[in-house]
Structures are given as C-alpha cells and as structure tokens.
Image (tube, grey):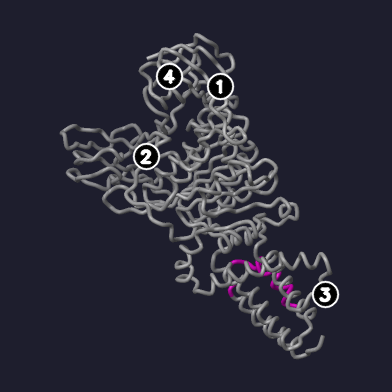
Amino acid sequence: MSGKVVKVSGPLVVATGLADANMSDVVRVGPQRLIGEILTMKGDTASIQVYEETSGLGPGAEVVTTGAPMSVELAPGMIEGIYDGIQRPLERIVEKVGACITRGVEVPAVDREKKWDFKAVVKPGAKVIGGDVIGTVQETPVVLHKIMVPPNLKGTIQSITSGSFNVTETVAVLKKEDGDEVPLTMTQKWPVRVGRPYTTKYPPKRPLCSGQRIIDTMFPIAKGGTAAVPGPFGSGKTVVQHQLAKWSDVDIVVYIGCGERGNEMTDVLREFPELRDPRTGESLMKRTVLIANTSDMPVAAREASVYTGITIAEYFRDMGYDVAVIADSTSRWAEALREMSGRLEEMPGEEGYPAYLASRLAQFYERAGSVECIGSDERRGSLTAVGAVSPPGGDLSEPVSQATMRIVKVFWALDSSLAYRRHFPAINWLNSYSLYLDSLKPWFDENFGEAFMRNRAQAMSILQNEASLNEIVQLVGKDSLSPADQLTLETARMVREDFLQQNAFTDIDGYSSYDRQEKLLSMILEYDKLCRAAIAKGADVMKLFSIPVRETIGRAKSVPVEQYKDAYAQMRDDMARQIDEVAAQGGF
C-alpha cells in the first residue's frame, strides 16, 4: 500500500493515505526509495523517521510500506562485517556504488552468493523446539556458527542435508504440529526493537577479564553485566572501549560506533585485523562485528544502530556464547532521540531530551544478562553491555549520565586531569564504583584465595587515605607528616603509577592477566607491610623509599610475560632483605 508525503522536516517525513500501516513498519520514501520507519500514527497520517538524507524530497512523493517492522538478517557472514546503523554492509555498498554512497541503495545484509559448509547435527525424525541447534557452520577459525530453529517454531525435522549452501537455500524441512511444512534456511530475521527470548536470566557470577588492572581488580564487571564509561572530551572513553573490545575474554564483540568521529572507527578498522587475540592467536576481527554510524552519517540512523547491534549480539548469545556490546556513545544516541522528539513536537523533558529518555536507556541495558538460552540442550550464554557517555563539559549531573547511573551497575568515571597527566586508563578511583563485588567475591576466593579481595580493599583504603592526606600536605607540607603517613603517600603512589597506570602501546603492559595483577598488587602491599614494621623498629623512612628494589618494583609491569612469576618472587626476596638491612641500621 502507498501514501503521499505532505511534510518534510529534516529526517522527519509526514505522509497520509497509510491507514492500513502499523507503527514501527519500515517504509520506502520517494523516488529514491529512502528507508524509513513509522514512529506515530494518527488516522491515516504517519510520522516517519527516515534513515537517509532527505534533501530534495518534497510533498507529493510516494511512500510505500513493506508491512514489516525494522529487522536484521541473522546468518553466517556477519562476523568481520562492517555495517551502518540499519545493517547495510558498507564494504559491499562501496563495491557497488563507490566510496560516495548514494541514497536509497539496496544491498542485502549478508552475502546471498557465498557458499557455506553446513554440517547437520540432528537426523530426520528428531523433535525440535525454537532455539534447538540443527547444524553448524565454521564461520571463522574461532567462531562456530550454530544454525538454530527460529524461536517461534517447533515440530519434527522431515529432512536435513549436510553440504555446501548459501544462506537462502533450504537446509532442512520442519513439519509443524498442525501438519504444515516449513523450509529452514541458514537465515533468520528478527525485529530490532524486540528482545530475543530466553528461558531463565541468572545473576552474573563470573568476571569479564579485560586485561586492564583498574577495571579487573578495582571495579570489575561481570559477564552479563552493564557498565558505563562517562567522561569529558579527551579523557579517553574511546581508548577504554577499544581496550575492552580488544582484550575482553568474550567469544564475540559487537562494536557500535554511534555518532562518534569517523577517524575513531577508522582506527578500529585498521588496528583490529592486525591485533592477535591472546586467547586464540587469531586476528581480533575473526570474532568482531562492527556497526559504523559515525557523526557525519544521518542522525536518525543512530537511534536504530544501537538496537541493530544488540539484536545481533543476542543472536550470538543464543548460541551459548559470551558476547560484549560496546556502544560509543549513548549520548550521541540520546541526542538523536532529542532531535526526533523535537521535530515530532513532543513535550520536552529536562534539557530538551524526551520524557522517555530513561526508559529507552533502560530498554537497551536490560537486554544484557547471563541467561539460559531457549532450546532443549540447556545452553548458557551472556551479553555484557558497555556504553560510553559524553556529558557536555564533563557535567555528570546532565540527564543522560544520571539516567545511565540509575540503570548500570558499574561506573568507570573518566577524569580529564588524569588523561592530561598521561595516566591511562584515566579512570578516577575515587568516583568510580562496581556493584558486582559481592556477587563476584566467591569466584575470586575460589580462584585466587581470599587475599585477592582483601588486597583490593586495602589498596582502595590507601588511595582514599592519600586523598585526605593530600589536603594536609597542601597546607603544611609533606615533611611535617609522620613517617607512617609518608609511607601511605608513597604506597599510594606505587599503586597509582606501578599498578593502575598501563601502557596500551606495549604488548607486555597492554594486557595483564588476573594472575599477574594479583601478584603485582600483593607485592606492592607487601612492601607497605614490611616498611611499616621497619618504621616501628625506628628505621629511616627516606632510606626505605630509596632501596634498590623500589625502582625494580616500578618496572615490574614491564617484565616479559613468560618471566614474571620468577621475577616477582625474586623481587619479594630482595625487598624483604633490603628492608631488613635498613631496619637493622635504625635511627632517623
């Protein structure tokens, strides 16, 4: 069915004659068949959000509805793919029309021609329900793509064939309980605004290892958890998210560049193919899907890009994989909501954002979780959501930051003053928090002993004491402090510079395993403990600060991976001996 355009206001198009259309239907607008989505309906008048540039479009242009909601195609071929906000494959568009992408171009999301080696894992006569795996495709060396029965189907497999197929060819025939036969291909379609179903959602119990010490030790996030990375311009949000995408111990990464600068996506596209995954040894792109909807692309498509990314992530979660969604940034997404809300003439909320901003953010983050997938084989999968927040001027009291803080359980507050001092990751340890510490404690106790969480609590206490002592130092100077307080400042400096600060440009320090983190922090706290005992015996605190091993500890994070266990043990022996020597000298 078709209607006529009566009004064009930027990405908002109003059309009449669409009485039989539904909200959220995808439409094609004008002679160029621009992609749009119906936002509101009043009688036969529809307000349409167009995901492409609308210049040149005028009243009288035809609008044709597809009768289906905004959906993504889920099939082998998505890994290593680069899509725009509405799942159009950018590489294949460039092949078709060149680098200057024309409006209205139509290219299928997954390659229709490529053949995949399908291996059936069920036999004819098997009874299956939605979510059951009927076959597998080795999509990349590290991703085994599981072909599943669509969630809304169940019945008996009439026939199934292993072999080489493209994504549109029938690989099996399912006979439903009412006798109808349904051909099954390797492709599923799913509306992006509807979360994919699962059987049970569990409390997250395992940490997501990112290789970043301030995250893993101080403010850990659980697999299936939610986190926000807020910070002003230049504080390193994108750097933190790139590190998470590179080194997190997940099976699949979906990186959504939502309204950020194009050169940041370019960095990802250039870096990821060259980097090696520490778990598999393969290129990081072999487990990555990129959604590129940068600041120079249509504003309205930002709103869709977040849903596109998380729907793709849910699909891989349903296979039983651990998936991470990195959204950079939700503030740009919220700005797209604000622009569309203003053009729809809705009542504005705080700072012009729509009144439903918080509920839309919640709908996104609530799709994260550790779940038991649908199907009869009891698969477990997790989806971890990490969103950057870009508050204007670094003001965390603005609506997007406040709404996000009410939803997420981990808050990594970036600090531009740390970034200017070249302290990366520039996460402020006094303003950040993780609400997963209690639920993750049993895992840490089981794998690293109870000392791990005790050391973490002690390190945080030392850093907090340093903040209060610095106020005194500014008034009366460092020399007026007691030896014990001077030691607190020195230990805090070691925790900050030798433990929390990392260099992403070196292979050794860019990624730090949990075992290495635990040994490095315990060595620094051992230094603090031995020095306090020596001070109690009358040792000169300045001599304790200048022992040779103090400099060695400062370089401990640069020790090659294969040598660190022996090197750290040697440092602890040298440290104990040298501190004992200073204590034996006594005197101040």
Residue at 72 percent of width and 66 percent of height: 468
According to the picture, the residue beneath numbered tag 4 turns out to be 42
Q: CA distance from mark 2 to mark 1?
A: 30 Å
Q: Point out the tag, 1 or 3, that comes first from the N-terminus.
A: 1
According to the picture, the residue beneath numbered tag 1 turns out to be 102
In this rendering, the label closer to the viewer, 4 or 2: 4
As drawn, the label of residue 480 is 3
Dot 2 falls on a residue whose secondary structure is: strand
Q: CA distance from mark 1 to mark 4?
A: 32 Å
Q: CA distance from mark 4 to mark 2?
A: 46 Å
Residue 231 lies left or right of residue 200; in this view the side is right
Q: Point out the tag, 1 or 4, that comes first from the N-terminus.
A: 4
Where in the figure is residue 329, as x and y percent of width and height? 58, 41
Residue flagged by tag 2: what amino acid is it?
A: Trp
Dot 3 falls on a residue whose secondary structure is: helix
Which quarter of the rendering shows the C terminus?
bottom right
Residue flagged by tag 3: what amino acid is it?
A: Ser
Residue count near mark 3 (Cα–Cα under 10 Å), binned few <14, some 14–19, many ≥20: few
As drawn, the label of residue 415 is none
In this rendering, the label closer to the viewer, 3 or 2: 3
Dot 4 falls on a residue whose secondary structure is: strand
